[in-house]
Amino acid sequence: MGRPKKNKKKSSRVKNSNLKKIIAGVDEVGRGSLIGPVYAAAVILNKSCNRKILKDSKILSKNRREILSKHIKKNSIWAIGKSSAKEIDKGNILQASLLAMKRAINKLNKKPTRILIDGDKLPKLKDFKMKAIIKGDQKIPEISAASIIAKVSRDKYVISLARKYFKYSWDRNFGYATKEHLRAIKKYGINKHFRKSFAPIKK
């Protein structure tokens, strides 16, 4: 009678241990853009999320990203963090990206036991176990999910700006230094949404 009872306790301990493992994936988007904030997302996937369909946001079509973003948001705990163009200009894009990640992590309504972050740098956060993973958005479903909802969220914001600043075609170039965008900057100048520390804006 004693032996089965002992096994039952051991099984219970293992089960409880597994329940305590809460993994969050974190990624950012918009580092290379000439305009607007850099966005970051932190995602804790639920069991109901289909991990097999999650990919790096950069290799997905716009429509596919939007479909997956809805699926992720419905089946996860998630949060978005941002760093403004002014914050980017005040420091640098790396520090602003890490700050956006930090803000996303702090906004999660459940504390993860481990955080996996795309890249090779970590934000400054106490009381969190973190690991940086190069090309993590291609390897880790939680990071892929973060890359998708961060990309979709930032794209929607830039498209909303494009309605007012239509001369820059931000709904197509999303603020990146395409030939079309650079021609528009040369012709119309810059506005408050540009990152003034970025070339060629700072010239």
Image (cartoon, rainbow, N blue to C red):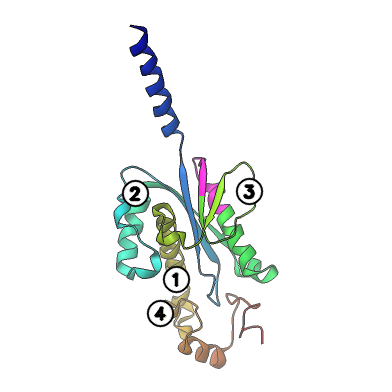
Classify 77 as above or below 95: above
The numbered dot on residue 74 is: 2
Q: Is residue 107 magenta?
A: yes
Residue type at mark 2 is Lys
Q: How far is mark 3 from mark 1, CA to CA?
A: 32 Å
Which callout, 3 or 1, points at the residue further toward the start of the chain?
Answer: 3
Q: Secondary structure at mark 2?
A: helix
Which callout, 2 or 1, points at the residue further toward the start of the chain?
Answer: 2
Q: How far is mark 2 from mark 3, CA to CA?
A: 27 Å
Residue 1 lies, in percent from the top left, at: 33, 6
Report crowding for label 3: few under 14, some 14 to 19, many 20 or more residues within 10 A (C-alpha). few
Q: How far is mark 2 from mark 1, CA to CA?
A: 23 Å
Q: How far is mark 4 from mark 3, CA to CA?
A: 36 Å
Q: Secondary structure at mark 4?
A: helix
Residue, disc 3: 125
Residue, disc 4: 172
Q: Secondary structure at mark 3?
A: loop
Q: Secondary structure at mark 1?
A: helix
Residue 121 lies, in percent from the top left, at: 59, 59
Residue type at mark 3 is Leu
Q: Which span of residues is magenta-colored?
A: 103-115
Which callout, 4 or 3, points at the residue further toward the start of the chain?
Answer: 3
Instruction: Indicate the quadrant where residue 95 lies.
Output: bottom right
